[in-house]
Amino acid sequence: MPSTPPHREAQAQAALVCMHGYEPRLEAAGLTALMRELELPLIPVLADMERIGICIDFAAFKSFLAEVSAEVESRTARLHELAGGPFNVRSSQQLAQILFQKLGLKPAGKTPGGALSTANEALEKLEGQHPLIAEILAFRTVEKLRSTYLEPMPRLADAHGRLHTRFNQLATATGRLSSSGPNLQNIPIRGPQGKRMRACFTAAEGNLLVAADYSQVELRVLAHFSQDPALVEAFLHDEDIHSRTAALLFEKDASAISPDERRGAKTINFGLIYGMGPQKLARELSITTNQAKEFIARYFEKLGTLKAFYETLVQDALERGFVTTLAGRRRLLPELFSRNQQVSATARRQAINTVIQGSAADVIKLAMLRTHADQALAGLGARLILQVHDELLLEVPEDAAHQAAEVLRDIMQNVVSLRVPLKVDIGVGRTWAEAH
DNA sequence: CGAAGACCT
DNA sequence: CAGCCAGGTCTTCGA
């Protein structure tokens, strides 16, 4: 077993130097407790997670790669046939030339750089206009799987067939962790191929994986901070938050909500976390911007306390120049004071999102400390191996897995006491896919 | 090395 | 008149 990775030692040391050199500044900002009680103790937890790693199923990787590679080949050939000649589909420039000049299709959007967009979102609007479109979308899915996951990852595994990521503690503006080299926080999960991808990540022989997800943790944090009666009530009674929102919005019984109405409420609930504007909402729901504006107005009319919380939050940020999270983490937002409307509007959304996303990060980091220190889990042989923002993954000897799952649930649900309960969904399985 | 694109929460 | 919701990492292209 290798010793602590050098970068981790260096990080721990740098953190201590920082503590000594800047203690007055930390103290003045009220950040000492966050540093001493959360971030510094987290370092050995992350080091253990990095050192332990996660098992991959080489045979599953190999057969999946073979199938996907064959599909990349065949789709490339079909693509060239449909385009009337060979070109590099991986080049957005060449692709745009084929689609919008050679075939004369109407561009459905532009990139931030001003080029004609060939992104999936733009291409989906053209689907049905030419058989090439569907072919490109399918090509991109398999090519992503091949180039980012299936081909490189097996080469990164150690002699025991385990993959070791790095959990970066200083990479985000909100207090989240990030993962790199390889990133194990963005393994595909959607669709049959996503599911198959996650099935390539397994427990070691004789062990099981326990996956524990915080359910709606960001909306619960928002309910806690805002104390909005509608949100708080919904979570206290463990109701479906999106149906509940839809019921409120459309003045119907929750049981009478259509799938479309629930989808609208879900989009607006999520958009809320990001400070979504009417344009984006309109696009997401295929309605006009004016309809979206009305929708948002009605939403805030029904959730007046939430609206007041947002206004106070932004007001506070403008007065202090920063926002703070549940654990007292701080994000400076100098761009709040930009004279450029676009820039200051972005900073306002960042202020809102940071309080919510950062507080959720505080919660799971604390849960990681408790999990790592828990004697019952240690006694069961349970080891924390991954964190994916609102999910923890344990590897546990198989006869102890279900017991460990309940201990973990208890730790995660009770790590902090909010005005609404925290809920954790748990799965146990031989692979990461099965554990979900 | 920046842009574009695609994957995640 | 355009305006596009937060936080990340990785791959590929093309200058």
Image (tube, coloured by chain):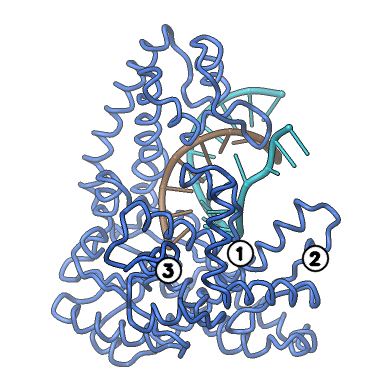
Chain colours: A blue, B brown, C cyan
Q: Give the mark nearest the N terminus, 1 or 3.
A: 1
Kindly identify which numbered label has been placed on residue A248: 3
At x 43% / y 85%, what residue is drawn? A420
| Label 2 Cα neighbours within 10 Å, binned few <14 / some 14-19 / many ≥20 | some
Q: Nearer the viewer, mark 2 or mark 1?
A: 2
Q: Which residue is mark 2?
A: A334
Residue type, numbered disc 1: Thr
- Label 2 to label 1, Cα distance in Å? 17 Å
Q: Give the mark nearest the N terminus, 2 or 3.
A: 3
At x 71% / y 88%, what residue is drawn? A30
Q: Which residue is mark 1?
A: A172
Mark 1, secondary structure of its residue: loop
Q: Residue A202 or A247: which is nearer the viewer?
A: A247
Vertically, is A365 above or below A125? below
Furthest residue toward left: A399
Residue A128 position, x and y percent, is 36, 22
Residue type, numbered disc 3: Leu
Which quadrant of the figure has residue C3? Answer: top right
Q: Nearer the viewer, mark 2 or mark 3?
A: 3
Same chain for marks 2 and 3? Answer: yes
Same chain for marks 1 and 3? Answer: yes
